[in-house]
């Protein structure tokens, strides 16, 4: 005849069974969230894999912040550069050349890309659209700088693209060269005026400010 379990024995069996189920549930929950419980201390711990995931997310977040800060600084410099370029054109504007200088006899001379060596030691009295941007950045040695190239990228975008379309900041070299030629042809059109060139540079400076606002808002 089977002996009936006492009340104490049943309570022990139930207690052990509930404890086992609770540990299994806790282990499953800890595995899914990257946390587990140290049963000896009762403290929750983070698994190595979860810590690595958090570190990667932190690195990505910091990298995004660094990129945004660098882009904001660049847009600020572009805005200042284009504002200065507009002032250059307001002081003197030329067509079919990059710069205007005064020669030894006091006569005005327009310099093209082929005789920029004559610019050395002479004050610039005028510039075309592209030449004004280059001059505001420090002159011909700065023509290949990223600041000048991206200022011209934004100028082309302001002239030819819808203001709401994203700016293509890094076009292929042949595309960028074609854009510079477009700006030069626009500057040299017979009906063009200095006021129109100044207005384009001022509009592009305002576009740089809008781009910066978009970066701060997380739009650009």
Image: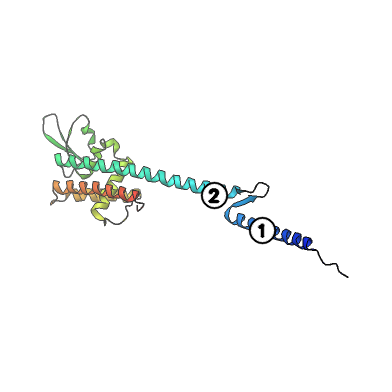
Q: Total number of numbered labels?
A: 2
- Quadrant of the rendered image containing residue 79: top left
For the residues labelled 2 and 1, say whether their Cβ atoms are less than 8 Å apart. no
Q: Residues within 10 Å of mark 2 (few under 14, many from 20)?
A: few
- Residue 44 against residue 29 in the figure, above or below: above
Mark toward the viewer: 2 or 1: 1
Instruction: Give how far across and how far down residue 99 sits, in percent.
Output: 19, 39
Residue 170 lies left or right of residue 112; in this view the side is: right
Residue drawn at x 73%, y 62% as measured from the top left: 14
Q: Residue furthest bottom?
A: 1
Q: Which residue is mark 2?
A: 53
Answer few, some or many: residues within 10 Å of disc 1's Cα (few below 14, many 20 plus, some between 14 and 19).
few
Which labelled disc corresponds to residue 220?
none
Residue 12 drawn above or below residue 102: below
> Residue shown at 24%/46% (left/top)?
205
Q: Which residue is mark 1?
A: 22
Which circle's residue, 2 or 1, is located before the other in the chain? 1
Q: Position of residue 68 (x, y in %)?
A: 38, 46
Give the image quarter of residue 164: bottom left
Apparent side of residue 185 relative to residue 68 in the rendered image (left or right): left
How does the figure colour the protein chain or chains?
A: rainbow
Tell which of 119 and 209 is nearer to you: 209
């Amino acid at each position: 005849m089977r002996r009936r379990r006492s009340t104490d024995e049943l309570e022990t069996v139930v207690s052990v069974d509930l404890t086992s189920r609770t540990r299994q549930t806790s282990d499953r929950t800890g595995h899914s969230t990257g946390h587990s419980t140290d049963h000896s201390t009762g403290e929750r711990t983070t698994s190595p894999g979860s810590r690595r995931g958090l570190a990667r997310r932190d690195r990505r977040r910091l990298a995004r912040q660094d990129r945004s800060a660098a882009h904001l600084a660049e847009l600020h410099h572009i805005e200042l550069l284009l504002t200065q370029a507009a002032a250059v054109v307001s002081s003197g504007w030329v067509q079919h050349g990059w710069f205007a200088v005064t020669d030894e006899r006091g006569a005005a001379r327009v310099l093209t890309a082929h005789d920029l060596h004559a610019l050395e030691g002479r004050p610039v009295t005028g510039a075309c659209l592209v030449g004004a941007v280059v001059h505001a950045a420090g002159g011909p040695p700065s023509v290949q700088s990223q600041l000048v190239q991206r200022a011209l990228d934004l100028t082309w975008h302001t002239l030819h693209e819808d203001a709401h379309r994203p700016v293509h900041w890094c076009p292929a070299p042949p595309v960028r060269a074609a854009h510079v030629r477009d700006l030069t042809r626009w500057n040299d059109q017979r009906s063009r005026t200095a006021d129109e060139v100044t207005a384009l540079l001022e509009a592009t400076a305002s576009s740089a400010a809008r781009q910066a606002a978009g970066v701060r808002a997380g739009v650009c």
